[in-house]
Image (spheres, rainbow, N blue to C red):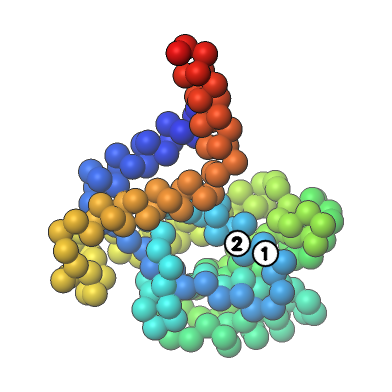
Amino acid sequence: MHTFLCFLSACVRFHCEGLRMVRVYELSIGNTLNCGRDFRDRLIKELPSWSEGTEGDCDAILAYCPIVSRVGTDVGAALGRVHGTKPAVLVILHHTFDHDYIVPDTGRFVNRQNTITVNCLFHESKGLLRGQLLDKAVEDALHFLRDHCPAGEDSRHPSDAKLPIFWPKLMGLKYCWAFICAHRRHIGIAVCVLGVMWYRRH
């Protein structure tokens, strides 16, 4: 029920606030074992104005970099794949089964402006390892995107200028659909429970 109410709240918020788009271009540098999708879904839960962008048409870049050799070498190679000057979040994926693994300071290897690194632990049998490190990575990425990406109707992307007036509502539905996809299991359960309650009353 809580998830269903959150969904309704998201709908109302988007129709009230209008168009607030954040175009994000995702780049996977190596085999992430779907950890990138998991990380993105966590961001979308808190940033439903998320929209998929392209390398040439985006507000920010989200690059996933699994560490396979030396940290400095892999981070440097990943930065070489991030072109342009758009703000970028480099999600460093450390392969381990240890939830208490101490990650190195990956930020010291970054020499690109408007770029941060966030660190996550992952394992092929578990995906992203839950814990304080993952929570901090998501929080830091959200703060960075909110600080460096336009928000509100006054800072719309130029390509939105000629869109029809009903477009904000359509985009609101798009973001609500993204929310549904991220919470599909819980929403499905909530719908089933509500259906049973309705059936019993009638």
Foreground residue, 77 or 201? 201
Q: Secondary structure at mark 2?
A: helix
Residue corresponding to mark 2 = 37
Which mark identifies residue 185?
A: none
Residue 162 seen from this side? yes
Percent x, y for residue 164?
16, 64
Percent x, y for residue 129?
73, 52
Which mark identifies residue 34?
A: 1
- Residue at 19%, 67% (x, y): give it: 163
CA separation, marks 1 and 2? Answer: 5 Å
Residue 139 seen from this side? no
Percent x, y for residue 106?
66, 70
Question: Looking at the rendering, which quadrant does residue 196 occupy?
Answer: top right
Question: Looking at the rendering, which quadrant does residue 31 occupy?
Answer: bottom right
Q: Amino acid at mark 2?
A: Arg
In the picture provided, is 22 more to the left or to the right than 33?
A: left
- Residue at 80%, 51% (x, y): give it: 100
- Residue at 26%, 70% (x, y): give it: 157
Figure check: 198 above or below 161: above
- Mark 1 crowdedness (10 Å alpha carbons): few <14, some 14-19, many ≥20: few
Percent x, y for residue 109?
63, 78
Contact flag, marks 1 and 2 (Cβ < 8 Å): yes
Q: Quadrant of the C terminus?
A: top left
- Residue at 29%, 47% (x, y): give it: 14
In the picture provided, is 97 more to the left or to the right than 34?
A: right
Q: Amino acid at mark 1?
A: Asn
